[in-house]
Amino acid sequence: MPPMLPRFVLLGLLLLGPAMAEEKPTGAPRNADALPPVALTVEEADGAVRCSPADLRLPADSNVELTIHNTTRNQVTLTAPRQFENRHVLHHDGDLVHVASNDGYLIKQNGKGMLRIRTLAEGQYPYGCTSVSKQSAPFQGTLTLSRTP
C-alpha cells in the first residue's frame, strides 16, 4: 500500500492547490472606508517650522493614511490632541516615533513616514508641528474633519 499513498497525496495537492490560491487575496486588503493617502509636509521658512497644509481637511469617522515628510534638518513633533491616541492609530511606519504624551509623533530630521488613523468625529481640532530645537515657536494649524458626501 505505500506506493498508493503518494498518489493520494499528489491528488490532494492537485485538488487543494487552486482552492488555496483562490483564498489568498492579492495586494492590499480592500476596505470600503479606506481613502487614498493624504500628504503632509513639514517645511522650514524664515527659520520657523510649519506644516503644510495649514488647514488639514480630512473626512470624519474614517480610516485615513497620512504620508508625512519632514524636509527640515531638525527633528519635529507633529501633534494633534486626541487624534494620535493609541486607540485612533491603526498603524505607523517609517521615521515616526510615538511621543509619551500620546498626542503626537516625533519625525526624524529629513524623515518620511506613514500614519494610518481613524479620524475623530466631525469638527475642528488643533494640530501643529514644533521643531525640537525651537520649541518656543510652534506652528499651529487646523484639522478640519467633515462628513464625506
Image: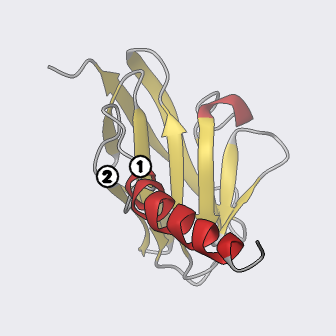
Residue at (60%, 66%) from the top-left corner?
8
Q: CA distance from mark 1 to mark 2?
A: 29 Å
Image quarter in which the C terminus is found = top left
Left or right: 140, with 30 as reference point = right
Left or right: 3, with 24 as reference point = right
Residue at (42%, 74%) from the top-left corner?
46
Left or right: 49, with 2 as reference point = left
Q: Look at label 2 and name its amino acid.
A: Pro
Q: Look at label 1 and name its amino acid.
A: Pro
**Which type of secondary structure does the marked residue at label 2 adopt?**
loop
In which quadrant of the rendered view does residue 2 lie? bottom right
Image quarter in which the N terminus is found = bottom right
The local crowd at label 1, few if under 14, some if 14 to 19, many if 20 or more residues have their Cα within 10 Å, is: few
The answer to which of 146 and 114 lies nearer the viewer is 114
The answer to which of 12 and 31 lies nearer the viewer is 12
Asked whether residue 78 appears in the rendered view, the answer is no
Residue at (26%, 17%) from the top-left corner?
147
How far from the left and from the top, in percent, is residue 36? 28, 50
Decide which of tag 1 and tag 2 comes sooner along the chain.
1
Q: Check the image and name the residue furthest to the front.
A: 1
In which quadrant of the rendered view does residue 40 lie? bottom left
User: To which residue does mark 1 refer?
Assistant: 29
The local crowd at label 2, few if under 14, some if 14 to 19, many if 20 or more residues have their Cα within 10 Å, is: some
How far from the left and from the top, in percent, is residue 88? 61, 31
**Which type of secondary structure does the marked residue at label 1 adopt?**
loop
User: To which residue does mark 2 refer?
Assistant: 53
